[in-house]
Image (cartoon, helix red, strand yellow):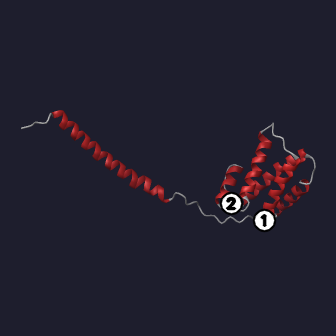
Amino acid sequence: MFEMPLYIIIITLFLAICLTIATFYFFWRYYFVLKPALIYVGKPETKNVRIEANDYLKEHWKKIRISMTSSDVSQLKLTIIEADTIIEDILRLNNLVGETMAALLSEASLHSVIGAGKLWQFHRIRNQLVHDTAFKLELGTARDILQKVDEVLKIWGF
C-alpha cells in the first residue's frame, strides 16, 4: 500500500487550519466591521440651512457695496478681504461648521446653499490676494468678482 510521507500530512493539516482561521477572520471583518460602516456611507447629516443675517451684517454689507464702486485697486483688495470675512460670519451664524472658510464653503456646498460655487471662486481670488505676493488683481476682475458675490447676497436677502 502507498504511504504518504509525514511532511505532506503536516503541511496539509497546517493549510487546512490556516484556511479555517482566515475564513472566520474575513467573515468577522465583513459582518462586524465593514457592513455596519457601509450603512452610513453617503448619508450626510441633514440640516435645514436657510441663510439669514442680522442687521449688523446687512449694514456692513451696504458699506461694502459703496466701496465696490471705487476705482482704486488697493481699496478693492481690502473690500474683497472684508467681504470674505462677512461671508464667513454669515455662514457661521447659519449653523454651518468648519474651522476655515474652505470648510464652511464645503459644508455649504454639501447642503446645497444657493451660490456656494460663486463663493468658492471668490474665496480663491481672496486667497491669492492674501497669500501670493506676485498676484496682480485688475480693476475689472475685482469688480466682477465682487458683483458676483453681491448677486449671491441679494438672493440671500441682503
Identity of the residue drawn at 28% across and 42% down: 18
- Given the image, on which type of amino acid does mark 2 rest? Asn
In this view, the residue in front, 147 or 77, is: 147
Q: Which picture quadrant has residue 45?
A: bottom right
- How many dots with numbers? 2
**CA separation in Å, label 1 and label 2:** 18 Å
**Could you say which disc has been placed on residue 155 in the image?**
1
Q: Residue furthest front?
A: 2
Could you say where residue 31 lies in the image, as x and y percent from the top left? Answer: 39, 55
Residue 128 is left or right of residue 109, and the answer is right
In this view, the residue in front, 47 or 3, is: 3
- Given the image, on which type of amino acid does mark 1 rest? Ile
**Could you say which disc has been placed on residue 134 in the image?**
none
Kind of element beneath mark 2: loop
Q: Are marks 1 and 2 in contact (CB under 8 Å)?
A: no
Q: Does residue 62 sit above or below 141 in this rendering?
A: below
Identity of the residue drawn at 93% across and 51% down: 70
Kind of element beneath mark 1: helix
Task: Quadrant for the C terminus, please.
Answer: bottom right
Q: Residue furthest right?
A: 71
Residue 146 is left or right of residue 30, and the answer is right
| Front of the two marks 1 and 2 | 1
**Could you say which disc has been placed on residue 95 in the image?**
2
Identity of the residue drawn at 73% across and 52% down: 120
